[in-house]
Image (spheres, rainbow, N blue to C red):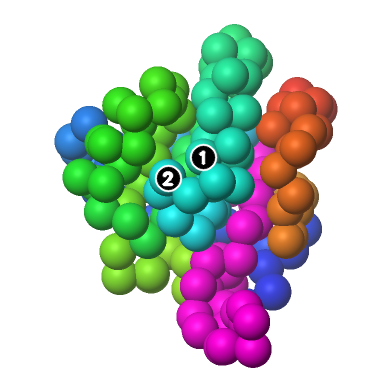
Amino acid sequence: MAGLGQGDVAPEFELPRDGGGSISLAALRGKPIVLFFYPKDDTKACTEEAISFSALAKEFQEAGIALVGISPDSAKSHDRFTKKHGLTVALGADEDKAAANAYGVWVEKSMYGRKYMGVERTTFLIDRQGVISRVWEKVKVPGHADEVLAAAKTL
């Protein structure tokens, strides 16, 4: 299901998470949710993105907004990533790429002429009823977390 956009119902997911246990859309329903899909733990842009969201995690929490990062890495990888960088956001492990496929972010990419499949850095803002309110595609990291926080506060 590609091309999810404003007004679409956010697909359900339940994923293992950093620190043990799992995280699901159903468990977060009733409050605004920010889902940020990123390609890989501990790479430059992904680390910058996770750190910038972590820096604002308290503001998201105080505004009643759930904040979840999702990548195809394992929960064990997320644990190392979280510990290494002092991250405070929940990270879902989408190893089978079911959530990435459901949200349409598992796409063909190209680097130096080589084509491969990977996660397109995308953020979804989901309202209290589970409907997608806004989508940021092909995210550029600088300033992104601030922009998402400002938009989420309007829900």
Q: Which percent across, then down, holds residue 141?
A: 71, 43
Q: Residue at x 64, y 56 (%)?
A: 122
Q: Which percent across, then down, holds residue 62?
A: 59, 10
Under tag 2, what secondary structure? Answer: loop
Name the residue that disc number 1 marks.
Answer: 47
| Mark 2 vs 1: CB contact within 8 A | yes
Q: Residue at x 58, y 72 (%)?
A: 104
- Whether residue 129 can be seen here: no
Q: Residue at x 30, y 70 (%)?
A: 96
Q: Is residue 128 magenta?
A: yes
Residue 149 position by quadrant: top right
**Amino acid type of the residue tagged 2 in the rendering:** Asp
Crowding at mark 1 (Cα within 10 Å: few <14, some 14-19, many 20+): some
Name the residue that disc number 2 marks.
Answer: 42
Residue 48 position by quadrant: top right
- The range drawn in magenta is 102-131
**Amino acid type of the residue tagged 1 in the rendering:** Thr
- Whether residue 46 can be seen here: yes
Give the label on residue 5, or none.
none
Q: Which percent across, then down, holds residue 91?
A: 39, 40
Q: Is residue 149 above or below residue 111?
A: above
Query: In the rendered view, does 151 fall on the left or right side of 45?
Result: right
Q: Is residue 139 above or below residue 89?
A: below
Quarter in which the N terminus is drawn: bottom right
